[in-house]
């Protein structure tokens, strides 16, 4: 298979990695697992191509795109839409030593007790490629100049600074930043709030009417409020309130008043989220019900509706707020389209766009408030 990625330039995971590095489980999804890499000698984070990065590896037995395909999509479709400063950087790394995979599986097995029940027992695939992904967590080493600017042989020239303990990272999914083209006229909820109300409502029914929600901030964050924060005082207040409490593990403590003020200023002035919205709209004018699974524009719109935004607010008040998008993988369109269409029909037929489900789920959707303030 031909590739737009120069295969000769992909760095090789050191053959000594299984002996010289520790792998710490960070998290996982349905098809991937994330590890951090630590040198055995002193527990320090590694230098070279690994510094400031997490190791992402594919799970075995999953019908998904290869990492080569995922990286090619990111390089050729996603990167042209945004600046380097807007994206969580990623690159391929070749794994030739099966001992590395064995070590990763041993580490994963040791975390069985804390894994999600439906993920337990899954293992790392014997794949040729893994991925190095920029580490956006707090209290980690990050580059002033990203190592992704340099070939592997030249990363020693990168200048790093440690995160300050008072730095703050906020994480959220922007989701659908515009209403679904398939939403009923007169809808009182946006697509994201309608979908989350549907999920809560069906879970409530499955638990015989007993809510299972516990823990941090269960209020649904309406994505329309993210965009309206510059002109709608109520939307801005709603977003700031949503992030006013700790949200471990990424945000282990609550923002300070100064950090809240800087985040508010970013919400009011950023151009990143409006650009994501514009790209969503430009690539999907008809909605899932009229979509073609083979339409690359619709595919891109759905990828942008599932990305994650990381906002880093440094302790230094003179440092700019940084915002980057991650989780921009190519989707398995053919497999997903049926699900997307069925979900859209359920939201319409079940009255979730209009808040007609019983019992009605609280979403605090900003759609009506924004309309009222505009009028």
Image (cartoon, helix red, strand yellow):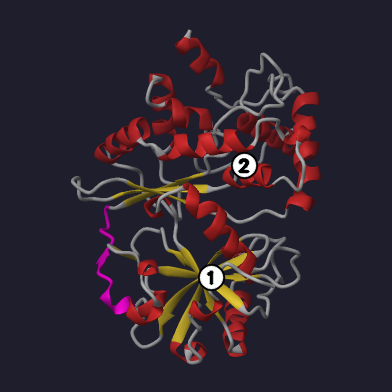
Is residue 157 one of those drawn in magenta? yes
Q: Is residue 78 visible?
A: yes
Query: From mark 1 to mark 2, how far is it between C-alphas?
Result: 24 Å
Question: At 47% from the left edge and 69% from the top edge, which residue is drawn?
Answer: 54
76 and 268: which one is in front? 76
How would you rate the neighbour count of disc 2 (Cα within 10 Å): few for under 14, some for 14-19, many for 20 or more? Answer: many
Q: Name the residue under label 2.
A: 301
Q: What stretch is highlighted in magenta?
A: 155-166
Work out whether residue 207 can be spotted. no
The residue singled out by tag 1 in the image is 131
| Residue 278, numbered label | none
Left or right of 330, for residue 265: left
Q: Quadrant of residue 122?
A: bottom right
> From the image, which quarter does the N terminus lie in?
bottom right
Q: Does the magenta portion include 194? A: no
Q: Where is residue 191 in the image (x, y as percent from the top left)?
A: 64, 30
Q: Tell me: 149 left or right of 180.
A: left
Q: In this view, does 352 lie above or below 170?
A: above
Q: Under tag 2, what secondary structure?
A: helix
- Decide which of 222, 337 is in the foreground and name it: 337
Mark 1 or mark 2: name the one nearer the start of the chain.
Answer: 1
- Measured along the vertical axis of the image, is residue 40 above or below residue 218? below
User: Whole-percent x and y of residue 146?
Assistant: 34, 65
Crowd around label 1: few <14 · some 14–19 · many ≥20 (10 Å): many
* View extreme (top): residue: 375
The residue located at (72%, 23%) in the rendering is 359
Q: Which of 316 and 357 is in front in this view?
A: 316
Nearest to the eye among marks 1 and 2: give it.
2
Picture coordinates of residue 317, whole percent (x, y): 20, 45
* Residue shown at 29% from the left, 79% from the top: 156
Where in the figure is residue 144, as x and y percent of width and height? Answer: 27, 62
């Amino acid at each position: 298979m031909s590739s737009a990625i120069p295969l000769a330039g992909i760095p090789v995971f050191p053959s000594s990695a299984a002996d010289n590095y520790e792998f710490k489980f960070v998290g996982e999804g349905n098809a991937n697992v994330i590890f951090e890499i630590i040198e055995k000698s002193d527990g320090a984070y590694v230098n070279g191509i690994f510094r400031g990065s997490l190791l992402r590896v594919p799970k075995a037995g999953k019908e998904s795109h290869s990492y080569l395909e995922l990286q090619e999509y990111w390089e050729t479709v996603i990167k042209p839409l945004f600046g380097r400063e807007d994206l969580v950087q990623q690159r391929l790394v070749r794994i030739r030593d099966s001992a590395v995979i064995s070590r990763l599986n041993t580490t994963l097995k040791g975390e069985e007790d804390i894994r999600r029940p439906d993920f337990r027992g899954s293992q790392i695939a014997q794949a040729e490629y893994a991925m190095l992904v920029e580490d956006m967590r707090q209290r980690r080493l990050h580059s002033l100049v990203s190592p992704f600017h340099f070939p592997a042989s030249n990363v020693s020239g990168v200048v790093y600074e440690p995160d300050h303990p008072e730095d703050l990272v906020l994480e959220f999914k922007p989701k659908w930043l515009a209403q679904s083209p398939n939403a009923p006229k007169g809808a009182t909820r946006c697509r994201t709030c309608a979908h989350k109300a549907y999920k809560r409502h069906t879970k409530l029914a499955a638990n015989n009417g007993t809510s299972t929600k516990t823990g941090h901030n269960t209020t649904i964050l309406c994505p329309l409020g993210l965009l309206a924060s510059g002109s709608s005082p109520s939307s801005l207040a709603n977003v700031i309130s949503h992030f006013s409490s700790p949200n471990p593990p990424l945000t282990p403590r609550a923002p300070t008043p100064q950090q809240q003020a800087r985040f508010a200023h970013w919400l009011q002035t950023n151009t990143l989220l409006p650009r994501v919205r514009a790209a969503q709209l430009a690539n999907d004018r008809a909605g899932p019900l009229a979509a073609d699974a083979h339409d690359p524009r619709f595919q891109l719109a759905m990828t942008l509706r599932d990305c994650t935004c990381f906002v880093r607010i440094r302790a230094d008040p003179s440092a700019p707020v940084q915002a980057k998008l991650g989780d921009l993988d190519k989707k398995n369109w053919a497999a997903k389209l049926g699900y997307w269409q069925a979900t859209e029909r359920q939201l319409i037929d079940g009255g979730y766009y209009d808040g007609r489900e019983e019992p009605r789920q609280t979403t605090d959707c900003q759609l009506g408030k924004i309309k009222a303030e505009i009028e």
